[in-house]
Amino acid sequence: MSGFIREWNLRGTCATLLAIGSVVDFLYLLSFSVPFVLSLIGQNMISNFGCFFLQFLPNLGLFSSVWIVFFVGVDRLISVLFPLRYGIFEEYLCIYILPMLTVTLGYSIYVLVEAANWALFVYPDWPVLCTNSDMFSFGMSTMLLRNGLLINGVSIICYLFVGWSLFRCWQKTPLTLVVGTYFAICFIRLLLASVTDPIFILHITPSIDALLTITAASSNAPILFAFSSEYRQAFRKHLKKLPLVGGIFLTQIGQQQQQLPNAAVVSMVGVFNNNAIPQPNSVGHVRHITTIGGGDGGTAVPKTMAPVV
């Protein structure tokens, strides 16, 4: 996100959505630290009232992440269907992104307001482990799964069209690889939403969905660093200031800078030895470079001289 803010060459529509997605994914990943910290201080169970406030931002990131995945698919589909007119959205980026952010935050806040009724007024003293799903009742969890089925169903249709178009032209760009991870997430979420078993919905589905989200959130940055020169330059520019990561980046950059001049010198020496230095043709003979034509435009050809006595 820091590189996106400072680097103007990363201000595209999809790059903007990916940057927002990294923020909401980070908020969602904080949900796993809450029960861990509670266990460290020796308090395994807390009230549902307190858990609501601890898990407010992580759940805001969770439901925002679902919509960001959806809008990334829509954005890529628009770029595939209307490539010539897609540049208009780049020029009016704020107008293009604002409705997406409105829907994303609006839905997330709506879900949290509905959850507040259950956690703060109906069962505020209910002891929970304070996972990200404890603030939702079973009926609300079923409603969220139905909504997720609809959102991820439309998302997977968008990604199928994008994948079909990319299969025809086969352009393995870094954004394509990131979109591929989002496609896998939507597909598996679609399968999970079709399960109606109560135990599976309350306990198993959140764990699988969390694993998928963590995998996608942690794989986007390495993919962009490995396959995009612009993102790689931004990573090196901004992460080299960190103590540990910066040393690793500086070491890699130094090795690459040493390898490139050495390779160039070896190549130039090889060319010089093969083309510029006269070489002996056989024992007792030397090769002499003369020009045919007698003028400046003559062609240089080797000529064998008589044996040297």
Image (cartoon, rainbow, N blue to C red):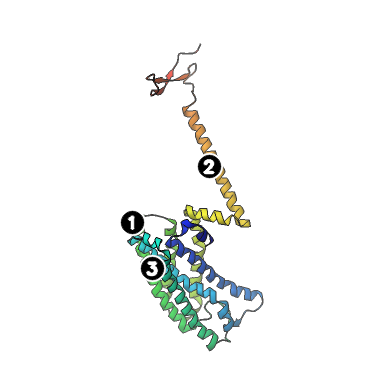
Residue 83 appears left or right of 180: left
- Per the model, the C-alpha gap separating discs 2 and 1 is 36 Å
Q: Dot 2 lies on which element?
A: helix
Q: Is mark 1 on a helix, strand or loop?
A: helix
**Disc 1 packing (10 Å; few <14; some 14–19; many ≥20):** few
Q: Alpha carbon of mark 3 to alpha carbon of mark 1: how far?
A: 18 Å
User: Across the whole image, how many numbered discs are drawn on residues?
Assistant: 3
Residue type at numbered disc 2: Leu
Say which label, 3 or 1, has the lower sequence index: 3
In the picture, the disc for residue 35 is: none
**Quadrant location of residue 241?**
bottom right
Where residue 128 sits in the image (x, y, percent)?
Answer: 57, 81
Say which mark, if any, is on residue 260. 2
Residue 162 shows in the view:
no
Q: Residue type at mark 1?
A: Arg
Identify the residue at horizontal 57%, vertical 79% (top origin): 53
44 on left or right of 118: right
Q: Mark 1 points at which residue?
A: 168
249, above or below 68, in the image: above
